[in-house]
Amino acid sequence: MDKEIFFSKISEKVFLTAQIRTLIEKNLSTLYFEKYDHLLSPGHIPTEMFYIEEGLVMGHTVRQKQKVVQWFQHNGSFLIPSCFFHQQPATEYITFREPTVLFSLPHTIIQSINKIHHESLNLFLLLAEDSIQAGKEREYMMRMFPEDRYRHLAKTQPYLFAGGHFEFLASYMNMSRRHFVRIRNRFAKEKN
């Protein structure tokens, strides 16, 4: 697995000293998951933050026996479960929609790095800020009309449509599957 991509992604955010990089690299683990595997369930405390080298990950809750999709993350994204920094029980499920390869860094290691190298705190705050920004992106999308939501998502996250995750896309866009299919068919006709 190519950890250089991981470190170049971090370098986009903040300068890493050689000592911090060495500590992170020494404690970085590679994890492999199959489609439909679960990473986290409500009530469990997240103990690691992740970087998605390859694959597609989905966060959802269950309301009235229905999956309500909150977010998707894919290749090149940092995955920081909600409540990770506070070390409180999770409120969502995290599942894999494709075979996925993750790099993981344990919370205990992050704490020890922050105690030794105070400047590393800035890195982890910036990564947390990215997760918050992704949530705001979905809020922004929800203010759009359904057709505009579809267009926006097809333009900004086309990889979601390639996998045929239509039931989950409909949930993510806050519309029924039937309405989603109607919009999808209309856009398919417009392209032809």
Image (cartoon, helix red, strand yellow):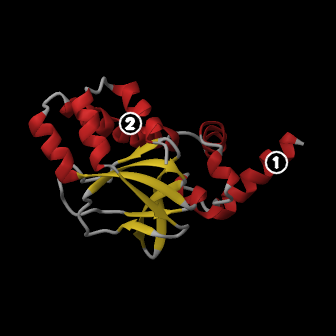
Q: Amino acid at mark 1?
A: Ala
Image quarter where the C terminus lies is top right
Mark 2 and mark 1: Cα distance apart in space: 30 Å
Location of residue 130 in the rendering, given as x and y in whole percent from the top left corner: 37, 36
Q: Circle 2 sits in a helix, a strand or a loop, which is it? A: helix
Q: Amino acid at mark 2?
A: Gln
**Mark 1 closeness class: few <14, some 14–19, many ≥20 residues within 10 Å:** few
Q: Circle 1 sits in a helix, a strand or a loop, which is it? A: helix
120 in relation to 153, above or below: above
Quarter of the image for residue 135 reads top left
Near-viewer residue (98 or 71): 98
Location of residue 126 in the rendering, given as x and y in whole percent from the top left corner: 30, 32
Q: Residue furthest left?
A: 115
Q: Residue furthest right?
A: 192
Q: How many circles with numbers are drawn on the protein? A: 2
Q: Residue furthest top?
A: 15
Location of residue 23 in the rendering, given as x and y in whole percent from the top left corner: 24, 40
**Residue 72 visible in the picture:** yes
Near-viewer residue (14 or 176): 14
Image position of 28 (left or right of 115): right
Residue plotted at (10% across, 36% down): 116
**Which is more N-terminal, label 1 or label 2?**
2
Near-viewer residue (16 or 131): 16
Image position of 43 (left or right of 95): left
Residue plotted at (67% across, 51% down): 161
Q: Which residue in the structure is indicated by mark 1?
A: 188
Near-viewer residue (83 or 176): 83
**Residue 125 visible in the picture:** no
Q: Which mark is residue 133?
A: 2
Front of the two marks 2 and 1:
2
Residue plotted at (31% across, 25% down): 14
90 in relation to 71, above or below: below
